[in-house]
Amino acid sequence: EEEQEHPVQEETMLYTVPDFVGHKYEDILNNQSYRVNFNLNPVQEYNDSYPAGVIVDQSVPKNTQVPHLTTIVLTVSKGKETVPMPNLIGWGLVGAKQQLDEAGIAYTVYTVENSNYTPNTVFRTDPPAGTELARSDATVVKIYITPEKTAEKDADEKDKKDNKKDKKTDD
């Protein structure tokens, strides 16, 4: 009896893709079977809904049957996108507004007397410089400037000086 050679058909072992979304990437990476069975490829992006380090999306849907070492791209949250509050103390109003506009920070301007600063100069911000502001929170920053000297006030000052000069010449 002659043995017929049958081509050996290698059965492809399939693996079920788990639901990675909502799990910490670090925990997934520490899971031996995930590392051995799948080629996990992380990409990071800002996300307002998930804290930093948590998986927000996966390229292969959960419960999909895939061959060994299939690449699965895991999108990992970097948390909310933030922008630091710039240091505007001593800036003129125009420059300060430009800085905030370029950074995409909403603001309200408050005019408050402060004799230590020249008119139209930022002397306080709320929150202070360096504070991380989440772009999505629509935080409205408060900037405080000194009032402009009005023409009327300047005229009064000039009149007083002129009056003093006049009095001196009268003597």
Image (cartoon, grey):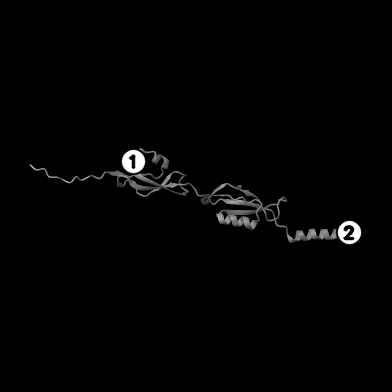
Q: Residue at x 60, y 57 (%)?
A: 98
| Residue in the image at 62% along x and 55% along y | 96
Where does residue 52 sit, x and y in percent of width and height? 47, 44
> Which quarter of the rendered picture does the C terminus lie within?
bottom right
Looking at the rendered structure, the secondary structure element under dot 1 is: helix
Of circles 2 and 1, the one toward us is 1
Q: Point out the image quarter for the N terminus.
A: top left
Amino acid type, label 2:
Lys
Tell me if 39 is positioned left or right of 166 in this view.
left
Residue 97 appearing in the image: yes
The one nearer the camera, 25 or 1, is 1
Left or right placement of residue 105 versus residue 149 in this view: left
Which element carries disc 2, helix, strand or loop?
A: helix
Label whose residue precedes the other's in the sequence (2 or 1): 1
Name the spot of residue 150 as percent of width and height, x first.
Answer: 73, 59
In this view of the protein, can residue 24 be seen by the observer?
no
Q: Which residue is mark 2?
A: 168
Residue positioned most to the right: 171
Q: Name the foreground residue: 65 vs 30.
A: 30
What residue type is disc 1 on? Val
Give residue 169's mark: none
Which residue position is annotated with label 1?
36
**Residue 49 left/right relative to 123:** left
Residue 156 % position (x, y): 79, 59
Image coordinates for residue 46, horizontal then vertical, percent: 47, 49
Within 10 Å of the Cα at label 2, are there few (<14), some (14-19), or many (20+) other Cα atoms? few
